[in-house]
Amino acid sequence: MFVLATLVSGSAFAIDEAAVEAAAEATEAAPEYYEKAEIDYTINTLVMFLCAILVLFMQAGFAMVEVGLNAAKNACNILFKNLMDLSVGVLLFLLVGYGLMYPGGDYEGKWFGFGGSFVSRDADTPALDTGWSNSADFFFQAAFAATAATIVSGAVAGRMKFTAYLIYSAILTGLIYPISGMWKWGGGALAAEGFADFAGSVVVHAVGGFAGLAGAIVLGARIGRFSKDGKSQPMLPHSMPLAALGVMILWVGWYGFNPGSQLTYSGAANAEATTYIALTTTLSGAVGAVVAMILSWASFKKPDLSMALNGALAGLVGITANCDQVSQVSAIIIGAVSGVLVFAAIIALDKLKIDDPVGAFPVHGVCGIWGGLATGIFGTSIPEGLDRVGYIMVQLKATVIICSWAFVTMFALFYILKSLNMLRVPAEEEIEGLDVVEHGMPAYSTASPSTATLAGGTVPV
């Protein structure tokens, strides 16, 4: 009875009303916890972070491919170069490259701009308008920059000085790649013309491929790769299991590379688009491997594993520019053509006596070009004001500009380093192996060297 009397008293009701009013005011002042923009920001940021990890893991794939397809005596050197591509690349991209690649709206439609160094955190005011964290965006873009740089490692393996490679890696990730990347992804001049390159067939892979071609030409072939009369002398890989593992890792990493480039994943439409991109990516890579296998089988009378592995990578590179806007049939055609192109390009480099130990230029350079052109041929997102022919011509023009930029600048750099005697190791050091000469540590405690002919004698390779 005492409790009931207290509850019905005026003073009890006054206290309860004040508490209710205070709670109501607090609820109105605080933002709703589950706002859609906040949910989108959270999902986009976390998925982008995971995709960036997959792209970063591609460094391991490149390392395994390059180590497996080269001599055991250079394995440690190749691994070291891949580590430095990432480490030096991240630092240079933070200080210079990221600001060059994304200079801001003031430089839309232009060829050059700089937005400053370091990454602006959005902890206090999350970037709900863009839909993802600035830190996640930097991580994702830095992983792409490292990918462009590490492509070159395989093309110059076995004969480039370590210091020269560090200089190259710093310049590519800090200047060359970001500047051409700005032309498309930073809203620059090529983007203004309607150039499309969804995840980087041209912007990433062709840039790395043509930089690798420049390095291979200026360096010259490995000792023993071609005989005195110009005949090709194959130098067998030391570990095909490592090479195959590397390709499988790269294929998995591509699901961060291509689907991750959707950038926004929250909502039914974005989720469907992201998974569709994974579908077209898978189809092209699979067909590329099958076609390259068939061609090698027909030409060499036996199926060649290394050719099939490069065929898979070729198909993945070819679809990277257009995975978001081609049909499944088109993805299969793109993969098939990629398989043909990589096979033909590997044979052509051999005839031209250009030594590319892992096929970096055929895979990334040639098929990167094809990816750019295939976007115009098969793409369904034709920019406003262009017809099909106009779209193809825009793709061709932009592809030529970006590839020329990468090749000319890197050729000049490698030539300068060669003129200063900073590029290639001496013959006796190349013969001994870069692991011991450059780093003082072999990758394996025991090794069974193969041999190559030099000046009438045999030398370990």
Image: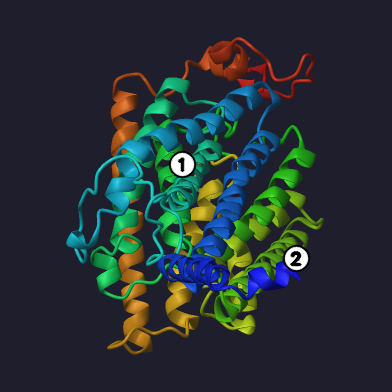
Quarter occupied by residue 73: top right
Q: Which residue has dot 1 on it?
A: 149
Of residue 300 and residue 248, the one placed in the foreground of this image is 248
In the displayed structure, 43 sits above or below 224; it is: below
Q: Which of marks 1 and 2 is nearer the N terminus?
A: 1
Of residue 400 and residue 300, the one placed in the foreground of this image is 400
Q: Which residue is drawn at 38% across and 46% down?
A: 121
Q: Which residue is drawn at 54% across and 41% down?
A: 356
| Disc number placed over residue 294 in the picture, else none | 2
| CA distance separating discs 1 and 2 | 31 Å
In the displayed structure, 91 sits above or below 436; it is: below
Residue 31, horizontal then vertical, whole percent: 45, 67
In the displayed structure, 137 sits above or below 333; it is: above
Quarter occupied by residue 68: top right
Picture quarter with the C terminus: top right
Residue 429, horizontal then vertical, whole percent: 54, 14
Residue contact at pointers 1 and 2, CB within 8 angstroms: no
Q: Residue at x 46, y 41 (%)?
A: 149
